[in-house]
């Protein structure tokens, strides 16, 4: 195993529109010890051709894996984890772009601290959390876990984090193939619980993700998609509770409280989304549970330091809208 090499894992499925830009941003990294592991998930566009062209001109070591059929992002990432060669591991989505110092920043964060996980700022954090810290900060285990579960910078995203390869190999933890929303949050939480070590956060943005505009437009969400995504998030948080339960006696109570708050917020989000696509009857199935947690949710969110202002406003607005619906 190399002493300083970074394994960069990229799952690709029909990513030809932005893939070249993504790969070019990797080629432009100031940190040069890069092993790129690309997993093509049975693309039927020009993705493979773009990857082959990149292999021919790249100074990076490139390993290309091809799935025999479309298996999903979790399967693809799990497959890539079997090909690690370096000391560090990070993940990138095929339509995103890195600033030239992204990898160097993450590596330097790990080298300069006792942390076992490094986190950098992502493109969405430019506006969402203006009160967020501006300087690099190391969080102890409990505080770090709250930052991962929270919604103000660190969060549970995969793409803004770097791990030690030996830690992922030692834990043997894989991505859950049964969920398609929050699989990164579950993976990050499970590994962090395994490590029980600090994390280091560098807030300045070095990673720019490309928002899925279609998913951001509520009117374009079909009923089936809303139900599937909402149910999936509830399953994700139930799985997180299952992870926390055996360690509950060792965990700070604020971790349990935050996980509970996020679960309730997911129910609140699901109710609101169901209403927007006309699924009123299904939304009312959560009515009794909603009235039990409504006041507690708003109080918890507003008093919590782990939610951005934007997220707090969003939750409060949805709570009020759902209340007006159920009072009719």
Image (tube, helix red, strand yellow):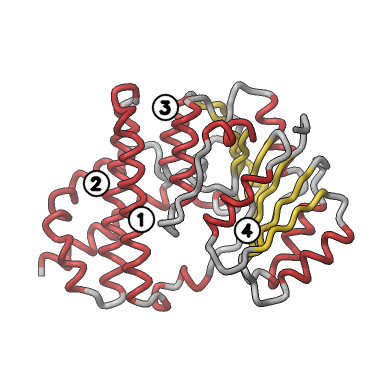
Verify CB contact (< 8 Å) between mark 2 and mark 3.
no
Residue in the image at 33% along x and 25% along y: 252
C-alpha separation, residue under disc 4 versus residue under disc 3: 31 Å
Element type where label 3 sits in the image: helix
The mark lying in front, picked from 4 and 3, is 4
What residue is disc 2 on? 297
The residue carrying mark 3 is 142
Label 2 SS: helix
Give neighbour class at mark 4: few <14, some 14-19, many 20+ (Cα, 10 Å).
many
The answer to whether 135 is drawn above or below residue 9 in the figure is: above
Say which label, 3 or 1, has the lower sequence index. 3
Tell me which numbered mark, 4 or 2, is placed earlier along the sequence. 4
222 left or right of 316 in image: right
Question: Which of the two discs, 4 and 1, labels the residue nearer the N terminus?
Answer: 4
Q: Are marks 4 and 3 in contact (CB under 8 Å)?
A: no
Of residues 72 and 212, which is closer to you in this image? 72
- The image quadrant of residue 230 is bottom left
How packed mark 3 is, by other alpha carbons closer than 10 Å (few <14, some 14-19, many 20 or more), is many
**Element type where label 1 sits in the image:** helix
- What residue did someone put label 4 on? 11
Q: Which mark is residue 233?
A: 1
Please identify, in this view, whether the residue under mark 3 or under mark 1 is nearer the observer: 1
Choose the circle earlier in sequence order: 2 or 1. Answer: 1
Q: Nearer the viewer, mark 4 or mark 1?
A: 4
| Horizontal and vertical percent position of residue 203 | 59, 39
Percent coordinates x, y for residue 212 in the rendering = 53, 67
- Tell me what residue is drawn at x 24 percent, y 57 percent: 319
Toward which corner of the image does residue 240 lie, by quadrant?
A: top left
């Amino acid at each position: 195993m190399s002493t300083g090499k970074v394994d960069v894992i990229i799952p690709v499925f029909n990513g030809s529109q932005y893939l070249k830009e993504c790969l070019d941003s990797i080629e432009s990294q100031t940190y040069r010890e890069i092993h790129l592991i690309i997993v093509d998930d049975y693309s039927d566009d020009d993705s493979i051709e773009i990857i082959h062209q990149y292999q021919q001109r790249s100074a990076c070591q490139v390993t290309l894996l091809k799935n025999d059929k479309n298996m999903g992002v979790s399967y693809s990432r799990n497959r890539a984890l079997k090909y690690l060669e370096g000391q560090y591991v990070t993940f990138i989505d095929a339509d995103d772009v890195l600033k030239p110092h992204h990898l160097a920043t993450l590596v330097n964060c790990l080298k300069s601290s006792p942390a076992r996980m490094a986190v950098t700022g992502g493109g969405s954090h430019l506006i969402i959390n203006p009160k967020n810290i501006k300087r690099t900060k190391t969080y102890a285990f409990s505080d770090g876990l709250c930052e991962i579960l929270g919604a103000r910078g660190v969060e549970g995203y995969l793409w803004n984090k770097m791990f030690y390869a030996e830690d992922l190999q030692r834990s043997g933890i894989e991505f859950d193939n049964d969920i398609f929303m929050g699989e990164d949050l579950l993976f990050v939480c499970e590994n962090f619980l395994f490590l029980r070590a600090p994390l280091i956060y560098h807030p300045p943005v070095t990673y720019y993700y490309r928002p899925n505009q279609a998913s951001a437009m509520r009117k374009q969400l079909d009923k089936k998609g809303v139900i599937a995504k909402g149910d999936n998030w509830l399953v994700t948080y139930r799985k997180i509770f299952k992870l926390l339960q055996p360690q509950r006696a060792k965990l700070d109570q604020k971790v349990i409280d935050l996980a509970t708050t996020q679960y309730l917020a997911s129910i609140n989000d699901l109710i609101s989304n169901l209403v927007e696509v006309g699924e009123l009857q299904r939304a009312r199935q959560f009515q009794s549970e909603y009235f039990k947690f409504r006041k507690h949710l708003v109080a918890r969110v507003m008093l919590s330091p782990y939610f951005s202002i934007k997220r707090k406003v969003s939750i409060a607005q949805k709570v009020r809208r759902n209340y007006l619906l159920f009072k009719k």
